[in-house]
Image (tube, rainbow, N blue to C red):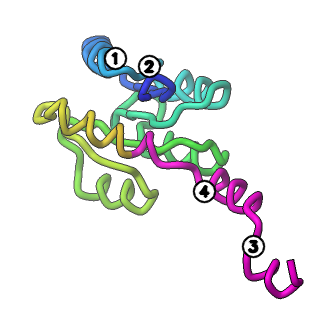
Amino acid sequence: MEGHYKILIVDEEDEIRSVYSKFLTKHGFEVGTASHRSEGLKKLREEDFDVALVDLKIPETGGIRMIREVLEEGIDTDTVILSRGGRKEDVVQAINLGIGGWFEKDEIRMEELLKKVRELAEVMPLEDVRRILSAVPDKESEIRNGK
């Protein structure tokens, strides 16, 4: 049932976008791509993506800034950083923003990336959990009210 999950890859490198896109598509994901921050934000605003793979050093201010903007705008997507030699400060900032994962491009194991993307995509959003729970009758209330 992975086919309904959508992944956005935001990376300036054509090869990275192509390789990751083909790999994730082969595993049943719908994949969109963007080569820079503003294009990635535009797509995230217009479409629902379950996970965004964001290059740390994308043009136009970088991946950390993009993730911060995603959070500020309330865009509901999990994010994973793709990096090539990120600094310790970048890792700390990303962790503080609540990223779902961090992968070094030169050391990436595609099966590990796939596992992480599946993990993040398959989590039900909190607002959906609340909506479902609100529709379920509260047994304690029914008992107190004699139903």
From the image, tell me which residue sits under label 2. Answer: 31
Distance, label 3 to label 1, CA atoms, is 44 Å
Sequence-earlier tag: 4 or 1: 1
Q: Quadrant of the N terminus?
A: top left
Mark 3 closeness class: few <14, some 14–19, many ≥20 residues within 10 Å: few
Q: Which mark is in front, 4 or 2?
A: 4
Distance, label 4 to label 2, CA atoms, is 23 Å
Distance, label 2 to label 1, CA atoms, is 6 Å
Left/right of residue 5 with respect to residue 28 in the rendered view: right
Amino acid at the residue labelled 3: Asp
Sequence-earlier tag: 2 or 1: 1
Instruction: Name the residue rendered at 46%, 26% in the picture.
Output: 8
Sequence-earlier tag: 4 or 3: 4
Left/right of residue 119 with respect to residue 6 in the rendered view: left
From the image, tell me which residue sits under label 3. Answer: 138
Write down the region rendered in magenta: 120-147
From the image, tell me which residue sits under label 1. Answer: 21
